[in-house]
Image (cartoon, rainbow, N blue to C red):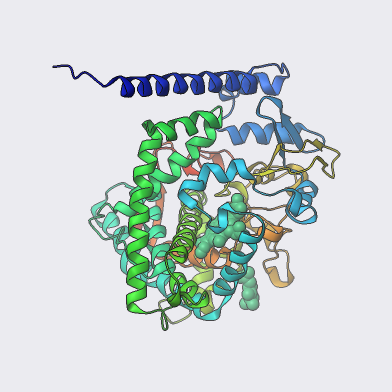
Amino acid sequence: MEVELPWGARCAAAAFFVSSLCVAALGVVLLLLRRWPWCGCHVCRAYLAGSWRREFANLGDWYADLLRRSPTGTVHVHVLGCTVTANPANVEYMLKTRFDNFPKGRPFAALLGDLLGDGIFNVDGDAWRHQRKMASLELGSVAVRSYAYKIVAQEVEARLMPVLANAADSGAVVDLQDVFRRFAFDTICKISFGLDPGCLDREMPVSELADAFDAASRLSAMRGAAASPLLWKMKRFLNVGSERELKKAIKLIDGLAAAMIRERRKLGVANSHDLLSRFMASSGDDARGAADDKFLRDIVVSFLLAGRDTVSSALTTLFMILSKNPDVAAAMRAEAGAAAGESAAVSYEHLKRLNYTHAVLYENMRLFPPVQFDSKFCAAADVLPDGTYVDGGARVMYHPYAMGRMPRIWGADCDAFRPERWLTGAGGAFVPESLFKYPVFQAGLRVCLGKELAITEMKAVSVAVVRAFDVEVVGENGRCGGGGAAAPRFVPGLTASISGGLPVKIRRV
Ligand code: HEM
Ligand SMILES: *[C@@H]1O[C@H](CO)[C@@H](O)[C@H](O)[C@H]1NC(C)=O
């Protein structure tokens, strides 16, 4: 039976329908304005037609090729209104010299705004400065560092090693990327708020929080791929499709974050070293209310995002490379064995001395940086050091993935996996490169705050695994000929992950 709507309601519905239609039409017009292939240059034509796919596995590989050919190391993709650079002088200019003219900017903040709120990743100016100061105090403190190391060591011993030993004994093929994602999520949850989501227990239960996080970061990244921001904003307004899904995931994350904050407050923060407790203590939390809960929620979510997929991405490509370079794995084993001496385990102090392993981690991220590109917003029109003019309001992207593959930065053998290129100090000691040539952790004023923690975590994992197991990639996903720069196919997203995962067989050594 049809229900007769009152006239007023029908009128309102019609008005709503018409206004949605207008918004949609406006969206289409803007899309055409932005994407109309006015530009017939070969870069824009290849971008629009997607013809780069014939030659390159990833958009990043195509950019790397274009940037290698460009005399300045900079190209402009006109149809995207975006300048892409692999020139270290430009990178230094954006991230240090003229830092204030190259903020993240509002368009970027809007994409991740619903997930990250005003967390450190998503803000500029004073809000960023304030959180940066607090976070660097906490992450730099000896108490937090040794707490974090203890968590990592526990997770490796009690969770990661048993999962791999199981795989070795059963002969099963496991997806190493998935194992590392679970490991990194558990670890960063414990470090961030002393909570254990238990992703890596033997039977591998699905964690609601981890799933919600995956969905939310994937769907937020999808917004960036939409032709015009109006399209996703309209979907959000109407609460349909991917925006509806995103809203659901964020609601779940909010619920869990609120529960964790309540729990922490009940338990007290005085003797706890997790980051949430430290932030509560240093912001004099107890006296304040809901406004601070939002602040704490945003900080915690930013740390989860920062510390999880990045670490698992680097560990995944590392074992892909080691599978092709057994001599490198053997050298790591020898170095760790010598450092440990009689004791079975490699201690925190031992880890710090592993120069060769350190070089292996850096060399891996040179070719496979977890964050492949990073875009900034040019506030006022500017000229980059290589002479490139950038309009006010335009996007400028620097590209660590392409930079790792530039002969003019790394020499003619830039495609080769060669840890020794980092061991140029006295007695073969590790010597870092300028971060502007190697902006894998970003560089300048906003350089990654978790760098030391991440390196320690990756050292602990890689040394433990290499000493106990041989890891062999099966199938095509780890295809990277001879250990060089040839890349697997990556899933587009905020951090690099290998499409289809990394299936491996594990053997005890
Ligand atoms: C291999 C691992 C890692 C890599 C490659 C990495 C890389 C990066 C990059 C590229 C940025 C700049 C992002 C941007 O502003 O767009 C960044 C920022 C940041 N990272 Fe990391 N990161 C890693 C691990 C971690 C870990 C484990 C933590 C936390 C415990 C962490 C905490 C942060 C924070 C708080 C920022 C924001 C800094 C700011 O905006 O001032 N990172 N990281
Ligand atoms: C290299 O080895 C020296 C001496 O053992 C040590 O002090 C230093 O921290 C090591 N550096 C790295 C990056 O591992």
Q: Which of 154 and 125 is in front in this view?
A: 125
For the point 34% across and 48% down, the residue is: 211
Give the quadrant of ligand 1: bottom right
Q: Is residue 504 visible?
A: no
Residue 209: which quarter of the image?
Answer: bottom left
Residue 286 is left or right of residue 52, and the answer is left
Residue 125 is left or right of residue 272, and the answer is right
Q: Position of residue 66 (x, y in %)?
A: 71, 31
Q: Is residue 482 visible?
A: yes
For the point 45% across and 62% down, the residue is: 300
Q: Position of residue 167 (x, y in %)?
A: 28, 54
Give the position of the N terminus as an image quadrant.
Answer: top left
Residue 312: which quarter of the image?
Answer: bottom left
Decide: is 13 above or below 486: above
Q: Which residue lies furthest to the front in this view?
A: 7
Q: Which of 104 and 285 is in front in this view?
A: 285
Give the position of the C terminus as an image quadrant.
Answer: bottom left
Q: Where is residue 402 in the image (x, y as percent from the top left)?
A: 66, 41
For the point 41% across and 45% down, the residue is: 216
Decide: is 369 above or below 69: below
Residue 500: which quarter of the image?
Answer: top left
Decide: is 138 above or below 491: below
Q: Nearer the viewer, residue 185 or 19?
A: 19
For the point 43% across and 36% down, the residue is: 476
Q: Where is residue 371 in the image (x, y as percent from the top left)?
A: 57, 48
- Total labels: the figure holds 0
